[in-house]
Image (cartoon, coloured by chain):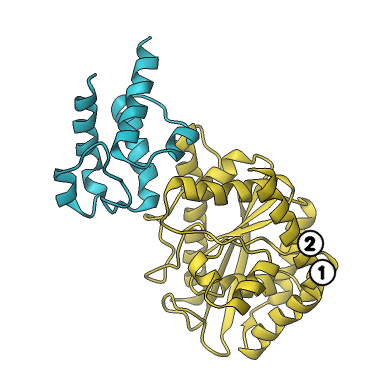
Amino acid sequence: MKTQEIFDQFVQLIKKYVKDVQKLETATMETKIIDDLKVNSARLVDIIINSEDAFDIEIDDDDADQIRTIGDVVNVIEHKLRVTAS
Amino acid sequence: MNAKAKFFLHLQYFLGRITIIVTAPALLCVVKLFGYRIRNLKEFRRKVSGMMSAHKGPWLICANHLTMIDSVVLAYAMFPVYRYIWSFKLLAWNLPEKMNFNANKFVGALCYLTKCIPVIRGGDREKVKSSLEKCAYLLKKGQSLMIFPEGTRSRDGRVDTVNFPYGVGRLVRNIPKCRVMCIYLRGDGQKTYSNFPRYGETFSAVVEECRPTTQLKGLKAQRDCAGQIVNHLSQMEKNHFRICGK
């Protein structure tokens, strides 16, 4: 799966949690999930769990704790998919 | 958690231990000054003591949250204040919002000496992680920790079973020896959340143990456990209103 495909799928997935939807339309890999998109910090875990289901992967605490930007999530998903495939 | 953070936690415990002779009566004064009463206090304390005798610790004390001084009222409700002087361990650690903790220097000092660890709510997971690491460390040492699983005061006056954080589930999953004590506390005049209970408030307090179990793994398990605790509190709330006939 290509990085852009993961990014697009994740942006769809995060939509219902984002308070500032306009910012999501111009989101990049550097967009901060809590600070820029105004996602409730408690709901970030729901987003990560939904990503686990959507991409059929498991994200552990340590990886989840590092997540700040959309790029962080995309990189974790990409890495997990690569590990699963190999 | 690094050695420096551990050292400062031990220092806080030590300073709290030697000043409890002042802070415990101060706690009692606050409760008496505002005329707060707990209904069936002896029975409530007997239950809490019984649970803590059966399991020495660690306990994760999970309560509903309606006012900014819930932890003060709960500390008074759980044990007579002289017991905190004899056994400082009985006083549970607390996690107040950093902004409230720093409201003024006197309150900040009092919070520090009565085992409060300030947390930044709504921060990123890295910041929350550092607070949770301290909590996990204390629980592993057999200390008790008081936490409000809803993460904030109940906005509509009822336990929020939808928008709650999962930090409590993370603690339960990471410290298997830790047991969960759910306490439901509500004043007769508390219709919704507020800064303080009204003057002369009479509270009802109920304590029950909750044993969250799950077959799930990772973050899903944390969410599941946190959900079970919050739902347990919500059930206690329903029972409270059923008994009150409201």
Comparing B95 with B216, the one in front is B95
Name the subunit of mark 1.
B
Q: Residue furthest right?
A: B86
Report if the CB atoms under discs 1 and 2 are less than 8 Å apart. Answer: yes
Where is residue B1 drawn, in percent x and y?
63, 43
The image shows residue B165 at horizontal and vertical percentages of: 44, 52
Q: Residue at x 45, y 37 (%)?
A: B219
Q: Which tint is chain A?
A: cyan
Q: Is residue B35 above or below residue B173?
A: below
B52 left or right, relative to B218 = right
Amino acid carrying label 2: it is Phe
Tell me, by letter, which chain the rendering colours yellow.
B
> Would you say residue B196 is visible in this rendering?
yes
Per the image, the residue denoted by label 2 is B14
**Which residue was labeled with disc 1?**
B18
Q: Nearer the viewer, residue B4 or B35?
A: B4
